[in-house]
Amino acid sequence: MAKSIDVSDLNIYYGDFLAVEGVNMTITARSVTALIGPSGCGKSTFLRTLNRMHEVIPGARVEGKVLVDGQSLYDSAVDPVEVRRMVGMVFQRPNPFPTMSIYENVLAGLRLNNKKLSKSDADAVVEKALRGANLWNEVKDRLTKPGMGLSGGQQQRLCIARAIAVEPQILLMDEPCSALDPISTSAIEDLIHELKEQYTIVIVTHNMQQAARVSEDTAFFNLAGAGKPGRLVEMNPTKKIFSVPDEEATEAYISGRFG
Amino acid sequence: MAKSIDVSDLNIYYGDFLAVEGVNMTITARSVTALIGPSGCGKSTFLRTLNRMHEVIPGARVEGKVLVDGQSLYDSAVDPVEVRRMVGMVFQRPNPFPTMSIYENVLAGLRLNNKKLSKSDADAVVEKALRGANLWNEVKDRLTKPGMGLSGGQQQRLCIARAIAVEPQILLMDEPCSALDPISTSAIEDLIHELKEQYTIVIVTHNMQQAARVSEDTAFFNLAGAGKPGRLVEMNPTKKIFSVPDEEATEAYISGRFG
Amino acid sequence: MTDLAPAPTERAARSIKNPRLPQYAPLIALVVAVAASALLGLTLGWGVIPIGIVAAIFYLIGLTTWSRIIENARAATDRLVTSLVWVSLTIALIPLVSLLWKVIDEGKGALNGKFLTYSMRNVIGEPGGIYHAIMGTLLITLAAAVISVPIGLLAAVYLVEYGAHSQLARWIRFLVDVMTGIPSIVAGLFAYALFSLIVGPGTQFGIGGGVALSILMIPIVVRSSEEMLKLVPADLREASYALGVPKWKTILKVVIPTAMAGIITGVTLAIARVIGETAPLLIICGATDSVNLNLFHGQMASLPVFIYGSYTQPGSNPEILKQMAWGAALILILIVMALNILARVLGKLFSPKTGH
Amino acid sequence: GAGNESDGSGSSLKGTIAGAGSSAQDSAMKAWRAGYQTDNSGVTVNYNPSGSGAGVEQFVDGAIDFAASDSALDAEKGEIDAAKSRCGGENALEVPSYVSPIAVVYSLDGVDKLNLSASTIAKIFDGKITKWNDAAIAIDNPGVDLPGSTITPVHRSDESGTTKNFTDYLSKAADGAWKYPSDKVWPLKSGEAANGTSGVIAAIKSGSIGYADESQVGDLTVASIKVGDAYVAPSAEGAAKALEVSPTDDTRAEGDLAIKVDRTTTEAGAYPLFLASYVIACPTYDKAKADIVKGFLSYVVSTDGQAAAASNAGSAPLPAALQTKAASIINTIAAK
Amino acid sequence: MSTVTTGTGSPKRRLGDLVFANLTRAAGLTILIALAGVGIFLTVEGIPAFGAGPDDLKGHSNLLTYVAPLVFGTLLAAVIALLIAVPLALGVALSISHYAPRRIAAGVGYLVDLLAAVPSVVYGLWGIAVLGPKLVPVYKWLASHFDWIPFFAGPASNTGRTIFTASIVLALMVLPIVTAITREIFAQTPRLNEEAALALGATRWEMIRLAVLPYGRSGIVSAAMLGLGRALGETMAVAMVLSASGVVTWNLISATNPSTIAANIALTFADATGTARNALIASGLVLFLITFVVNFSARAIVSRYEPGSK
Ligand SMILES: Nc1ncnc2c1ncn2[C@@H]1O[C@H](COP(=O)(O)OP(=O)(O)OP(=O)(O)O)[C@@H](O)[C@H]1O
Ligand SMILES: Nc1ncnc2c1ncn2[C@@H]1O[C@H](COP(=O)(O)OP(=O)(O)OP(=O)(O)O)[C@@H](O)[C@H]1O
Ligand SMILES: [Mg+2]
Ligand SMILES: [Mg+2]
């Protein structure tokens, strides 16, 4: 069910401010693509155009094309709500719904979309999603407890479970581990490994080692200068990026000489 | 006029929480001493005990001794107001008084004691302090403009000018460059070089290179473990710390293996 | 570097040890001031108030002068301001204590079984009850809440979620702020003028009071709800959108439930704020001494109006009615305080659990 | 419902009527309503002491069933015609229901008996006499040791029938010393203003003088006013006597028992500073209400009713002749 | 799995969103309409008063001379209240934000909020029964020693129910709101600026003068104006406490006092009929306009200085 993504000539604006310019990129289905680059270069901005979350911000808009298996996301006939069901997202800070139990959190995507689920179906969905997020064993005895009661890493996995419960085809992750301790981080990284069997995953990370560990392809974004828009400098298989990148800027960034 | 500082068996508390434990340290007059260490280890906390700014926080207190040229800062007969005049401080984020002009900002400290400063004396003090902070040439034509109108780096130098205008003997700086761009940073570093001719300077920094560039001595603070108080691990000449530190933890920290 | 400032040696000579007053100096000054003033006052036959005022003046002058002599001018100013701050706090709290004490002292005598269960119908020459006024107050306030809460909450949702940066929202936000300052009597006149034109001249009934109070209540509800909605992290909205949930459902199912504790607290405080209003009800609800539970017909009693009426027009049994007025004031204050406490409790009760 | 509002019924009458108007009659109304409602527990009589003017207006608007007013309907203001059209073209009924002496109250240390003539009272309230030991006061009070302190006159700040009758008395009895017309609103800006009778009572502190319904003066000392050559203290009997010597207004239609109060009577024992207040009703009502209005107002002017008012409101019972006339007028009330 | 396109047309906005968004907008508009309604209905019902004569205006020849003394009294009482309340409020706010230990500060804050929770009619009771009588000797003393100051010309009231007493009660009633706003602003003073001042060797008061007060200046002004708005419109306490004759006088301690618009309405509304009611409503409109202007300015000041707005 995973899908590939084709981005062509994408310009991303916040009002009049051009934040990211001229991105062309192809993201392979059932693989992990990492987005790296210095702060402010537009990684998050770009990521959010892939499920039309960008336009949630007032005044924000895009020019250009994003195709998911050939279907254009920004077609006027396309309902952004439907897009977001197809393209799930996990955020930097874990954000379970504080008023809901663990069980309800997992079901939130389905329930809020008016799916009438029988109790046994719902149980099945919850178990499947939590297992998928490697969280089942830790929480199966306290499903009715508030989701906020979990540790940070558990909360993040709960958010992943919540995202995959609606069975998206693509999963976007914006620095999913940056608020987590090393143990939780490695739990999430393991999870990403498993998830890519089924999902197309795009992950933003500041941690070069993480990019190297989890991704097949890496895209390096950079700013051409202060006040200039961010742009895609280079996209290549991760191995190549971390050994012999095409661009000098990539090399400089990866070796830690700036950023 | 600079003075040396002797710290012995200093325990620093926030209420019941022991933040820093058992510091013994001697800071040489007319030199720059850098404090380094991972976040939360108590560098800022320790620094603020050197001019009794620590006790500004409700419930905060210290045990132990801080001697400045043999005078105990925490003696009951000592007036903290006088201590702070003698030991100036520059903060992480530049904080000029927003309602005052550049000129008034520089004079703010002096005006407190010396209400009847003649215009010519005041002019002289302002010029001297601003020259001392390497800011005179940039602002001499707009002394009556608000201090907030300057760039971040200029604001920080304005704060330094404000601090040295009261002619302290010691200058404490808590990550004075962390909010600044590289060019402003190097202006401040140059300034520190000049200031140490006259002042005893203690600087907290996260930037190892900066510590190496500006300081004569370096003190490495660390946490013994999560929830445990911070402590001074090692203090040595900067050269030695960055080449052959006594402690393994120092080595690990400096080489970037943790923190 | 040119040396323009005073010679460094002079500065270096400055000692950090200034002479200082003992830590308990303010206490000593206070005791001495009070004692001196009391002595003076008792010999000259003053009352408590002049003694208090003179004691405060003695304290201010005494401590400042002492510090001026022993410490220095700056320290003296600092002590003067510190003392002024404490004196002003005392001055502000004395009336509150006096008021509460008076209400309790005068009001407790009125409290008995009949007081809360009887009305004033057919009661002459003996203490009756305020059941009719309590019911009126509760009904009118309930009506006000029923009008205000949906309008206020929805408007807050508009301000935070939909209008956000629009010109309209800016105006609404601004005028809501302005509206918080509408005099209550004007709200009463508005309701009166409104229903005079709609229903007929001189109409007085409970729902009119509800409308008048809601004019006072809506801005409070909007402001507090807006603050609470703004506190809901954008994260949560995004999390919900990212699950493919439409905006309106996100607001109803995620944003509002998350803010619920704060909203309820705000509404409760708004109720507490308007439940003691007198002036508008005097104009639009009138008064009666019987129980009237019909908001849409006939005059309706309320606690504040009962207090006002009983105290200012006690008729032929002034002692009885004045005592009842104090009793009703006590009940009213208790209700308001109970609402304030309830607001806190509800806030705790509805706030999202973290489950420890 | 409240513990005292039972639903059991003593008579077959059932229904609610509403009245409004005179606040002076409020205490009496309470007594009347209580008495009548006790006998007829299915009946509710509401009364809103909103003020005479408001009562008449609401009556004319048809918002209430009867009004109570401290002054008779005023032909000049068109009230009689308005009331007539309210009552479907028939003249409204108007009978005195409440008569109460108005006391001149004062507080003065060491002086517990005070005699005042109308013109002295007028000068005091007009600010012409400002000290207690003024010659004009001394003349009325030989042998009394009057202090030289300032007099603070206290008056009503709200509109009031008491004020209207007090100023009416001054304008008629004070030999020109009071040049303001009779009015519900106190005509002067000087002196201490107090809201309501109780406000006036509360404001009478040492050195003050005021006027208030006699039934509510409580422990305060009251002055005697000069009637003829004697000084008369306020009392229900004195007021009743003064009322008896006052003629009814014969320009009025039948059923309108307006009285032209004689403020300058010299009748021995009469106390002409009093307030006479009326109830105003229509001759016909809906079937549902006619019996209740008739029953209630009959009770008001009955001996029982007047006695109840006298004991609860301290009013003077209507003189027998007036009472009979009033009762017969009320008795004409009928269903449409 | 669902497809991305959902039919033809432009489902940019879903029905639910459309309905809900408009519902909330309607609620917002209702508020604007209500506010306009207050002005409109008061105007409509107030207009007949322009034709009112002395009968309906307590002897005044026209509406203007009727309302003018009331406006005077309203402003006088409110301004005196403010003169008392603002310095006190600043003191209380500072004690909460910068002087009291945190535990005490919370308690004090709660007590001050309690002042706001007391219904105005109870203030009225207290003013008549406690404050007024307690102030009588003070007034007597002022009148006998300071009668050369017009404010204290006397003769002193016997009951203490003067405009000055009313102003003190008003001051108590506006104290909480002024305190709440200023303490909020003081507490928001950037810690950095406070520490900058302390690190220069400032005493606590000098720190407040250097960092706190300048930062809160506009907030103090607008808090005072909001307090003014409250004081102008406060009704019952004044109506109960004040012995109101409706004169224009600067004498603050005598028995003969100016009245305020709000108190005048509350006291005379029940008795008023016909055009007299219209006149009261017209005076209410004047009060509405005054408070509107005051609150409007106050809010305008606040929003001008609010961080993030231009
Ligand atoms: N809501 C917004 N409105 C306006 N500009 C924005 C907004 N969010 C981000 N930007 C701007 O867009 C540019 C790209 O920001 P973005 O957050 O995408 O960077 P990033 O690469 O994700 O950085 P980081 O690594 O810090 O997360 C920046 O210049 C940023 O200031
Ligand atoms: N105001 C305070 N109240 C209570 N605890 C505090 C306070 N400020 C700091 N701490 C605690 O004291 C310890 C030391 O903090 P401090 O700010 O001195 O660390 P630091 O080394 O300066 O860190 P950083 O590099 O992040 O500035 C930390 O555990 C911190 O949580
Ligand atoms: Mg980002
Ligand atoms: Mg720090």
Image: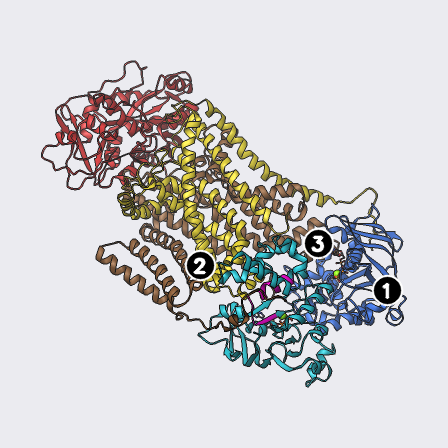
Chain colours: A blue, B cyan, C brown, D red, E yellow
Q: Amino acid at mark 3?
A: Leu
Q: What span is colored magenta in the figure?
A: B156-172
Tag 3's secondary structure?
A: loop
Residue A33 falls in which quadrant of the image? bottom right
Tell whether label 2 touches label 1 (CB within 8 Å): no
Q: Is residue C15 left or right of residue C63?
A: right
Q: Label 1, on which residue?
A: A30
Left or right? Give the position of C148 relative to D296: right
Task: Find disc 2 in the rendering and name its residue.
Answer: E108
Disc 1 and disc 2: Cα gap in Å? 62 Å
Quarter placement of the C terminus of chain C: bottom right
- Residue E136 on the magenta span: no
Task: Respond whether the residues carrying marks 1 and 2 are from the same subunit.
Answer: no
Q: In the rendered image, which quarter contains the N terminus of chain C? A: bottom right
In three-dimensional space, the C-alpha distance between marks 2 and 3, rounded to whole angstroms, equals 45 Å
Q: Position of residue D132 (x, y in %)?
A: 18, 35
**Residue B133: x and y, percent?**
64, 64
Instruction: Look at label 1 and name its amino acid.
Output: Arg
Q: Nearer the viewer, mark 1 or mark 2?
A: 2
Find out whether the residues at labels 2 and 3 contact each other: C-beta distance under 8 Å. Answer: no
What is the number of the mark on residue A112? Answer: 3
Residue under the point 50% across and 75% down: B73
Q: Is residue B171 magenta?
A: yes
